[in-house]
């Protein structure tokens, strides 16, 4: 099975469907880390300087949505994310965001 890239899918949408695109509500979740420990980074330091983390890192997991009409809800996700929790977040926030943005 071949999957199109998101850009490829967007290019297949007829050009006269701007009103349809204005009603799309995009959503996603992300984790924001205070000190990124799992990514490659390049920081210039003077020779002999040692980097330290004083009080640990910490992270926060967020879910949010947006459309051409603006931004919807932004929700902090407590605990671990799984399918049931993601459906709960959508049930509690997606429809209300669509209504707030007058996408109905």
Image (cartoon, rainbow, N blue to C red):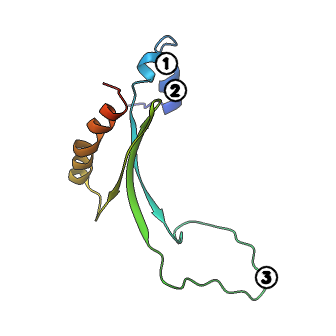
The nearer-to-camera label among 3 and 2 is 3
User: Which residue is painted at 79% across and 82% down in the image?
Assistant: 46
Q: Residue furthest bottom?
A: 48
N-terminal of the two: label 1 or label 3? 1
Report whether residue 5 is seen.
no
Question: Which quarter of the picture shows residue 66?
Answer: top left
Q: Is residue 6 above or below residue 43?
A: above
Q: Which residue is mark 1?
A: 12
Q: Residues within 10 Å of mark 1 (few under 14, many from 20)?
A: few
User: Which residue is painted at 49% across and 25% down in the image?
Assistant: 10
User: Which residue is painted at 49% across and 10% down in the image?
Assistant: 16
- Residue 63, image x, y percentages: 37, 50
From the viewer's side, name the closer residue of 101 and 29.
101
Q: State the CA–CA distance, disc 2 to disc 1.
A: 7 Å
Q: Residues within 10 Å of mark 2 (few under 14, many from 20)?
A: few
Circle 3/circle 2 CB separation < 8 Å: no
The nearer-to-camera label among 1 and 3 is 3
Give the secondary structure at mark 2: helix
Q: Which mark is residue 28?
A: none
Q: Is residue 88 above or below residue 44?
A: above
Circle 2/circle 1 CB separation < 8 Å: yes
From the viewer's side, name the closer residue of 23 and 51.
23
Quadrant location, the C terminus: top left
Give the secondary structure at mark 3: loop
Q: Which residue is mark 3?
A: 46
Quadrant location, the N terminus: top left
Q: Which mark is residue 8?
A: 2
Q: Is residue 8 left or right of residue 75?
A: right
């Amino acid at each position: 099975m071949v999957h199109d890239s998101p850009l490829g899918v967007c290019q297949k949408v007829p050009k006269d469907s701007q009103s349809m695109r204005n009603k799309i509500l995009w959503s996603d979740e992300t984790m924001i880390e205070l000190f990124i420990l799992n990514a490659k980074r390049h920081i210039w330091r003077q020779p002999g300087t040692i980097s330290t983390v004083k009080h640990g890192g910490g992270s926060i997991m967020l879910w949010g949505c947006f459309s051409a009409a603006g931004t919807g809800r932004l929700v902090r996700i407590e605990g671990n994310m799984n399918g049931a929790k993601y459906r709960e977040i959508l049930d509690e926030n997606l429809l209300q965001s669509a209504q707030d943005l007058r996408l109905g």
